[in-house]
Image (spheres, rainbow, N blue to C red):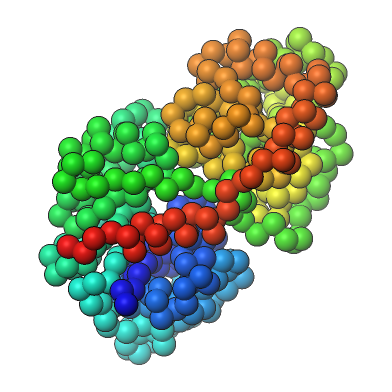
Amino acid sequence: MSRIFCDMTTILAHARKHATVTGIQRVVLRVVGHLVAMHGPQAVRGIAWHPKLHRVVEIDLSFLGPDYRFEAHRTDFLREMALPDNADGQSRTPLRRLGARIERLRLRTSGGGERLSAPSLRPDDRILVLAPNFRNEPYIAYLAARKAAGNRVFQLIHDVIPLLKPWLAKPGHDVEFRKFLDRTPDYVSDFLCVSNQTEADLRLVVPAAGREIPTQVVPEAHEFMGDAEDGPIAHSIRALAEHPFVLCVGTIEVRKNTLALCKVWAQLRQDIGVGLPRLVLAGQRGWRAEELFEWLDAAGDLEGLITIAERPSDAELAFLYRNCRFTVFPSLYEGWGLPIGESLWFGKLCIASNSSSMPQVGGDLVDYVDPEDLEGVRWAIERVVTDRAAIEAREAAIRAAPLRRWADVAAEIYAAAEDAVPC
């Protein structure tokens, strides 16, 4: 029987330098955790280019499950994966830096972690790559050789925004992304895409996609990816629930259209006055956001009507979702749009953009706006702020709707890999 080998390269690279996981890394852990729970660690294996051992390794994934909490188990993960702890290295005391150097030396001489071994792939095994691998030519060459040996290699594509709309991406990321996509025909047998929009976009920028290389859509989930269990919540976060607020979740950057939303809030303040809820922006600071923060400084955060909850924990983000009146997500472009689905998961109305993939996420459960029509955005928000019945009607429809779980995503990915005809 063929096995599924899940690429964990991006997780290993990320874990060395970061104490938490976000975005794509969280998707990888959630999907792979469900695959292991469904089919067992003998049928679902891990494979990765090890950043310290400089070779391809096979990983026993028996430690991983659908509710795996990276933050709680990071120390064990680093030890088992034979990785040094380089997180926040510049801020450590001299003693901790010395300890980190000793640990790196130990790992270098020990030859690897207990869960690592040489790859045991057979020609009928499948390889599932759930995240892009940048600047890793040795590993790409390995995957290309495995494809030539008969393995089908599936690459999941989350979006191609850096190429389609480079002005909305991190500066220089378009060049790096182009190099990544140019190599995919060498090692990819099948593309999996997280939305219909992403599939259409991929076919625009990779001529082989949909032709020599088949494409298939496996939509992402509505289910909240974080740990929603009770956990420590900062007093500043709890205090936000003392007054009505509207929530906007996502990296605070130009693509999320946050500055336009803040300007809409300034206009709503004039129109509605004291009845306007506070706007809470929950996320980390991203790129090309300088104009937004300059505007907030000049506006004095609208006298407290706009608040930033920077880098909230999973528990804090779940708390914000549960206690907000509704959410807004006026992003200019998305490959999927996780905050829309998460809002629905918590039973909350979302006012979201009508562009790119976002209508596929929300279906008929979401109020849509043109993200570049600020008057339309203002009207949509004012309508639900002043009409509680409109929110309640939407919430009733959301409660009755079947929502997609990460287990569904994992099952469809597994089926796509199993149904593929061997090379």
**Which image quarter: residue 187?**
bottom left
In this picture, residue 84 sits left or right of residue 151: right
Question: Residue at (73%, 61%) from the top-left corner?
Answer: 229
- Residue 211, image x, y percentages: 18, 41
- Residue 34, image x, y percentages: 52, 65
Can you say whether 288 is above or below 262 in the image? below
Instruction: From the viewer's side, name the closer residue of 100 and 247.
Output: 247
Can you say whether 399 is above or below 110 in the image? above
**Which image quarter: residue 1?**
bottom left
Question: Residue at (84%, 20%) from the top-left corner?
Answer: 275
Quadrant including the C terminus: bottom left
Question: Residue at (49%, 54%) from the top-left corner?
Answer: 409
- Residue 19, image x, y percentages: 54, 63
In the displayed orientation, state which residue is furthest to the bottom: 110
Question: Residue at (52%, 24%) from the top-left corner?
Answer: 354
In this picture, residue 392 sits left or right of residue 375: right
Instruction: From the viewer's side, name the closer residue of 339 and 237.
Output: 339
* Image label count: 0
Instruction: From the viewer's side, name the closer residue of 324 and 137.
Output: 324
In this picture, residue 112 sits left or right of residue 275: left
In this picture, residue 110 sits left or right of residue 325: left
Can you say whether 274 is above or below 166 in the image? above
- Residue 341, image x, y percentages: 59, 41
Visible in this render: residue 370? Answer: yes
Instruction: From the viewer's side, name the closer residue of 119 and 262.
Output: 119
Visible in this render: residue 147? Answer: no
